[in-house]
Amino acid sequence: MPEKYGFPKEFRIRTKKEFETVFEKGKRILGERMVCYWLSDEQMSNKLGIVVSRKVGRSVKRNQIKRYIREFYRLNRPYFCKSGALVVVARVGLSEWNHQQIDAELARLLKAGGILNG
């Protein structure tokens, strides 16, 4: 797989402590079927964490949702206004949405939060 299409470790939120920090100190942006937490931090390059519980759907749907969110992040990372950590939490019912609906909702939430340009 070419490197430019990957999701390297330096762009991931990986530890429980990093997730807890973003949840406690970050700004919450509520959407219809997802919630975004943004913690602006200049020392941290842009990082992404994804939370999709079993309540959302079976493993195939959960993994598909995570792929859609990672792809949105990969394509839009250059347009982020600031450096920081983003955690996207999927809510029940998101598995019924298609790729375009998930992209549109993420773009709307991030623009409303002042994270995404354009």
Image (cartoon, grey):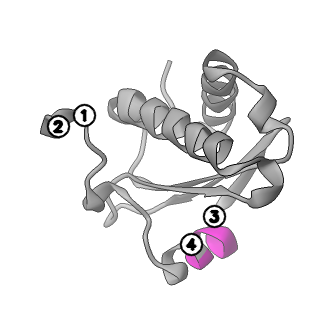
Residue 105, position as x, y percentages in the image: 70, 27
Residue at 65 percent of width and 47 percent of height? 62
How far apart are the alpha carbons under marks 4 and 1?
24 Å
Q: Are marks 2 and 1 in contact (CB under 8 Å)?
A: yes
Q: Main secondary structure of the magenta part?
A: helix
Q: Are marks 4 and 1 in contact (CB under 8 Å)?
A: no
Quadrant assignment for the N terminus: top left
The region drawn magenta spans 20-25
Which amino acid is tagged 2? Met
Residue 72, position as x, y percentages in the image: 48, 30
Name the side, left or right, on which 80 lies relative to 25: left
| Residue occupied by mark 3 | 26
| Residue occupied by mark 2 | 1
How far apart are the alpha carbons under marks 1 and 3?
28 Å
Which amino acid is tagged 4? Phe
Name the front one of labels 4 and 2: 2
Name the front one of labels 1 and 3: 1
Helix or strand or loop: what does disc 2 sit on? loop
Helix or strand or loop: what does disc 3 sit on? loop
Name the front one of labels 2 and 3: 2
Residue 81, position as x, y percentages in the image: 43, 37
Which amino acid is tagged 1? Tyr
Name the front one of labels 2 and 1: 2
| Residue occupied by mark 4 | 19
Specify the quadrant of the image occupied by residue 102: top right
Mark 4 vs 1, N-terminal side: 1
Q: Is residue 79 visible?
A: no
| Residue occupied by mark 1 | 5
Helix or strand or loop: what does disc 1 sit on? helix
